[in-house]
Amino acid sequence: MSHRSARVRLVTLLAATALGGAGAVTLATPAAHAASPNVVISAVYGGGGNSGAPYKNDYIELYNTGSSAIDLSGWSLTYRSASGGSGGSTALTGSIAPGGHFLVQEGAGSGSAAALPAPDATGTLNMSATAGSVVLAQGGTTVDTVGYGNVTSTYVESSPAPAMSNTLSDIRTKGCTDTDNNASDFVSGAPSPLNSSAPQGVCGSGSTTPPPPTGEPATIEQVQGTGFQSPLAGKNVRDVRGIVTAVNGTSGFWMQAATPDDDPRTSEGIYVYGGSTAKVGDDVTVAAKVTEYRPGGRSGTGNLTTTELTAPTVIVNSSGNQLPAPVVVGSPGHVPPAQVVESGAPGNVETAGLTLDPAKNALDFWESLEGMRIQEDDARVVGPTATNYGETPIIPGNTTDVTNTPRGGILYKSYETPNAMRLILSDALLPTGSVAPANVGDSLPGATVGVLDYNFGNFVLMGTEVPALKSGGLQRETTTAQSGKEAAIATFNVENLAPSDPQTKYDRLAGQIVRNLQAPDIVALEEIQDNSGAADDGTVDSTATSDKLIAAIAAAGGPAYQATWVNPENDTDGGQPGGNIRQVFLYRTDRGMSFVQKDGGTATTSTQVVGKGPKTSITFSPGRIDPTNAAWDNSRKPLVGQFEWQGKPLFVIANHFNSKGGDDSIMGRFQPPVRGSETQRHAQATVVRGFVDDLLAADKNAQVVVLGDLNDFDFSQTADILVGSGKTALTDLPRTLPVGERYTYDYQGNSQVLDQILISQGFGKKWSYDIVHTNSEFYDQDSDHDPQVVRVQ
């Protein structure tokens, strides 16, 4: 499935149309005047190598309806797009025996599907899986033409054949029916290519539909099995029966057994991938191949697979049936283990022989419901709607085994409290615009119903009924203004700010700085892009970005800020390619704060601590800390600035540590998850801590602020390294707040700390601190991070 639309895949699959091509447009094209009326195109397939395709290559199949062999020398096959554009030709050689087939292999896709039977000829035509035309010609004379799908050209006989898909080919009825009407001559069905080695046919003796896949009879529960993967994976099954519970456009549908079995480990639901005209409420019998599909996201390797039936043949037994009752999650017997994802350390949970324990493990609980109808009552919204994708994190309304935030979220407070009852509610199956976006603290009164899927490291509730939404009244916070004796120092990740961003983003960020943060004396900004934004053109300076934000702040009634930073080397600091993100200090000088400018700092030169006691200083301001250290490979280097407040030096270190990209998902197949990215953050924290130690060795009372987007939790080893110990220990300010208030970011419904401020003991106890919740909980956020501020004397 494709990212951010769950089961709505990137490849559009069109449903098979009924015999006769209902609704097709008749094009004014004469019947084929065959140089040899005995050769016809008997099958076409354009989905080869695409997602879910049974074969790696496209193909065209020919059939000799006559009683003598046909020499194909000088013959060709030409592909035309839906609008008639030429897609190339394949020259043919060889001959077709009477009653024989001739298989022409065409272009390959990128998938790892099976090879075709040995082809009789090969070409490189890349045919559409949904609409196009194939023309068979002898010399310059057309022998046969097949147009399929929504063709708008004249390369079609009367009306087009049904649209195909990645899992459907078009097959000539009776093996050779040729009335010069593609709509009545072809039906869609599972690809079943035949080459010259196939048994000879007798024209008119074939079935009007391809035979269903062979295999053993199975129930949905037998297909799903008692583990994370099907015991029948890779095999063909038949007589799989269920009620259609949801339809995914033309890509496929979910079905569920009408009567459940008595094994809580086996799911009663499953996804059927492939074009079909099945409707919700249909009682269907399916013959198909059992496939384990691993969805994308983080390269997909750490995600669980979902069990699917692919390349299906679907028989509708009856329609209008009552749907199986949904499992009410949170009701007695169906409460997910909130804080145990997978007990023990099984490693890869998909290892053969491991069975589910839904009562003990949350991963097993959700897996046992894969593909089934489920319901949550009075669901709580614990993460803002990602409006680009229509996804909202929710938990059952009666959930108790969590630490709540004061504003309606739930806290990720340790690795042992993953809050595994979370689901991502998707609106992909619902009418566009029918589901209102939500903030943290909102609720969905009544029943929220859908089918359970999995994508991007999370279980996803594919909503099938538009839920009600009740606002929780969440408002953006405003901090207390600093007094005349206090200096306010803030950190704010402004999420890839570039000059090309709309002025509204600048205005809203400026409003947050001026009003919500009360115009701090220093603002350490993270993710300021260069003057050309994501254009990878060698630009590294960011004056245009900083100036545009400073102007917006002034327009919002704020003070006249100045900016300082060190330009990075091109494409060496990670982040969005071409953007050259860096940290920037904004500072105001109208309240007694001043910046100590010491020129000479470059992308690769390291600032050093010099002097002793009150005369402690650094060699470059602004400067970077050990920028050539391997800890900073493809990551942002720390920015150090020396300021002066009330006659004393003040050292501020702005950080943006490497991201968590590549870490295993909490709800992934590797348990416990491996956090591989933290190794680099530990190294980065060690370098920064070493610089702080140098400052404190020079002046034990030095006033040092370490702040920024550390991309790690307040309970992490990264934070522990920065804190240190003993008389030189820093105070990690998020740890001073009540537990429920410790968050700057909401990731998939888990409120958590990623941004932090730490201060040295030189400030004594004359400080106050606030995380200002203005973004992370809101669907209309200006950044994905909340800013925070410390006021010191």
Image (cartoon, rainbow, N blue to C red):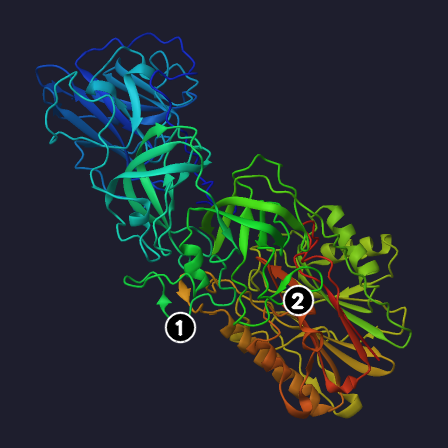
Spatial distance from mark 2 to mark 1, Cα to Cα?
Answer: 28 Å
Q: Residue at x 57, y 46 (%)?
A: 448
**Quadrant of residue 131 within the rendered picture:** top left
Q: Which mark is in front, 2 or 1?
A: 1
Q: Residue at x 29, y 49 (%)?
A: 222
Q: Residue at x 58, y 50 (%)?
A: 377
Q: Considering depth in this image, is 702 or 43 the residue closer to the camera?
A: 43
**At label 2, which amino acid type do we have?**
Tyr
Task: Kindly state the secondary structure of the residue where label 2 is placed.
Answer: loop
Q: Residue at x 72, y 64 (%)?
A: 787
**At label 1, which amino acid type do we have?**
Gly
On screen, residue 706 versus residue 361, left or right, reads: right
Residue 411 position in % (x across, y down): 62, 66
- In the figure, 658 relative to 778: above or below? below
Task: Kindly state the secondary structure of the residue where label 1 is placed.
Answer: loop
Residue 148 position in % (x across, y down): 36, 22
Q: How many marks?
A: 2
Point out which mark residue 344 bears.
1
Q: Is residue 64 visible?
A: yes
On screen, residue 137 versus residue 341, left or right, reads: left
Q: Is residue 534 visible?
A: no
- In the figure, 310 relative to 138: above or below? below
How many residues crowd mark 1 within 10 Å: few (<14), some (14–19), many (20+)?
Answer: few
Mark found first going from the N terminus, 2 or 1 = 1
Residue 244 position in % (x across, y down): 41, 36
On screen, residue 241 versus residue 537, left or right, reads: left
Residue 401 position in % (x across, y down): 57, 66
**Quadrant of residue 116 within the rendered picture:** top left
Point out which mark residue 743 bears.
2
